Amino acid sequence: MESEFTLMAVHAHPDDEVIGTGGVLARYAEEGVRTVLVTCTNGEQGDGPGGVKPGEPGHDPAEVSRRRLDELQESAAHLAIDHVELLGYPDSGMAGWDANADAEVFSNVPLDRSAARLAELMERYRPQVVVTYDEKGGYGHPDHIQAHRIAIAAAEATGIPRKLYYTAIPRAGIAQMMDYLRDTGVDVGDFDLPEDFGTPDEEITTAVDVSAYFERKRKALEAHASQGENIFLLRMPEEAQRQALGREVFVRRFSAVPVPDGEEDDLFAGLR
C-alpha cells in the first residue's frame, strides 16, 4: 500500500543484516513499519561444518548455502522482518579469492540485470527508506560493493525511495571499543584495522538508539551459528556487545524531504 511505511535493507550475504541494521529492522517492525530484507547472495563462500574454508577438502558450497539460508530465516524471525527476498546470486568471496573469476557470481553479474531485479522489488514494496552499504561496501567486499551499486541504480531508476542511507561504523567508536576491550583484559591479539577503516565521524548524519533490541540482535547473530568463528562480537564480554549493538549509525545519501538540523535519530524523520 502506498500509504504504508516501508523500510528496505539491501544486504549481500546471510548474516549481514544483523550488526548494522538488525536494530532498526526490529525497532521499526515493532512500530508498525513494514520491513523488507533483500539478501543478494546465498553465502556459498562461508565456512562449512567444522569451520572448513572455501577451497579446502570437505567444503560443499551447496550445503553451506542451504544452511546459511536456513539461518537467515531464523535470524529474520528474531528481528520480526516481514519479508525476506532472495536474489539468489552465487557468493563472490572476498577480494582476491578464486571465486572472483566465476562469471556467475554476484559481483560479475551485469549491473543492469541485477539492478532491474531489485527495481522490481522496489516497485512491489515501494519503500520510503532504503538502507545499504557505502561505495566501499563497508570494507571492500566485492558483494557489498555490488549491493551498493544495485541499490543506487534501482533507487534512481524507480524514483521510489524518499530517503537512502549507508550503514556506517564510526572511526571514533572503533577506537573506543578497542580501548575498552584492552582495558578489560580481552586478548585482541594483533587485531589491527587499516587507518581508513570505518566512517569519518563528521560524515555521520543519523544515529538510532536500538539498545532495547539488543537481545533480539544477539539472538539473530547467534542464529548464524555456522559462521560463529567469524563473528568476533559474540566472543566479546556482554557489556562490550551492548555497546557495539545498541546504536546503529548511518550516512544519509539523499533525502527528498526536509530533514532536521543536526544528527537525526529516526530514519523516517521528515516522512511521518
Image (cartoon, rainbow, N blue to C red):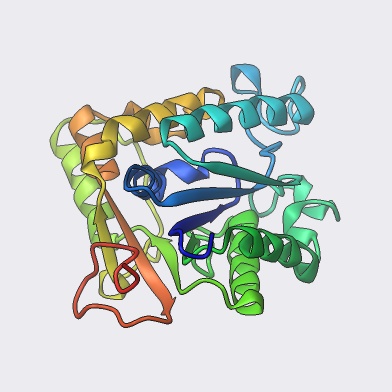
Using the rendered image of the protein, determine whether residue 47 is visible from the camera's viewpoint. Answer: no
Q: Residue at x 71, y 33 (%)?
A: 54
Up-down: is 252 above or below 216?
below
* Quadrant holding the N terminus: bottom right
Residue 242 drawn above or below residue 248: above
Q: 129 left or right of 107? A: left
Lateral position of residue 61 relative to residue 213, left or right: right
Residue that appears at 23% across and 46% down: 177
Q: Is residue 29 above or below residue 236?
A: below
- Disc tally is 0
For residue 102, above or below residue 186: below
Residue 132 drawn at (x, y percent) = 50, 61
Give percent across and percent down for residue 97: 71, 48
Q: In x, y percent, where is residue 28?
A: 35, 49
Residue at (28% x, 66% y) in the render? 206
Left or right placement of residue 104 versus residue 9 in this view: right
**Residue 168, can we see it?**
yes
For the point 34% across and 32% down, the residue is 216
- The reply, left or right, for residue 156 in relation to residue 187 is right
